[in-house]
Image (tube, rainbow, N blue to C red):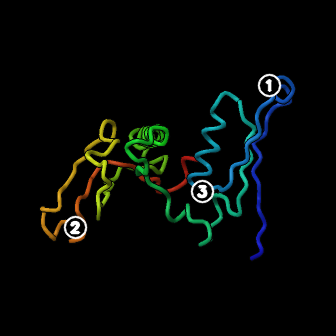
Amino acid sequence: MNFVLRTLQIPQSYFTKLFMPRKRVVVLGAGVSGLTTATLLLQQEKKFEVTVVAKHFPGDFTSEFTSPWAGAHWRSYATNDDIRQQEFEKETFHYFWNHAKVTENEAGVMIVDGFDYWEQLPEDFSEPWFKTFCPDVIKFKSDLGAQSHPQFVKQRTRFSSQSTISIKILC
């Protein structure tokens, strides 16, 4: 497979280079996750010099660049005892939730229902850890009937989440 990686270098002033040296960070990928990471690093009081390295950037309409077509959505992957991952996920949730509440049309972020389906519940599972900040968390048991979900599902959880339908917010 032949391809050329392109980079996007974020410029800094001569004064900043001379008197306020910054850490250099390379972000791989210019999709929703990569550009979100680069944007958040740049917002941290000029602490970082950020270079984004990717095969495709916003504006490249090719099937190899999924962000213009697919976007992203928030969901938790943290276990109940993984506090560090929970903090990352909580901060991410609030960041995109605020954009969805304030600037849905401009940002391309909207509030949607999220669902988790459990074929087998983890041993320590009682409630989703994110129920304290994620609106409308509702657990459904398998006794709701076959019409509500596939038969193999032991439980499902519905919650309000957000979906990035484009990368406009990051450009």
Mark 1: amino acid: Met
Mark 3–mark 1 distance (CA, rounded to whole Å): 29 Å
Count the labels in the image. 3
111 relative to 12, above or below: below
Residue annotated with mark 2: 149
Q: Residue at x 73, y 47 (%)?
A: 26
Q: Residue at x 19, y 55 (%)?
A: 140
Q: Residues within 10 Å of mark 2 (few under 14, many from 20)?
A: some
Q: Residues within 10 Å of mark 3 (few under 14, many from 20)?
A: many
Mark 3: amino acid: Gly
In this rendering, position of residue 31 left or right of residue 78: right
Q: Residues within 10 Å of mark 1 (few under 14, many from 20)?
A: few
Residue 40's x, y, as percent?
60, 38
Mark 2–mark 3 distance (CA, rounded to whole Å): 32 Å
Outermost residue, bottom side = 1
Nearer to the camera, 18 or 154: 154
- Mark 2 element type: loop
Residue 143's x, y, as percent?
12, 62
Residue 37's x, y, as percent?
61, 45
Outermost residue, top side = 19
Residue annotated with mark 3: 31
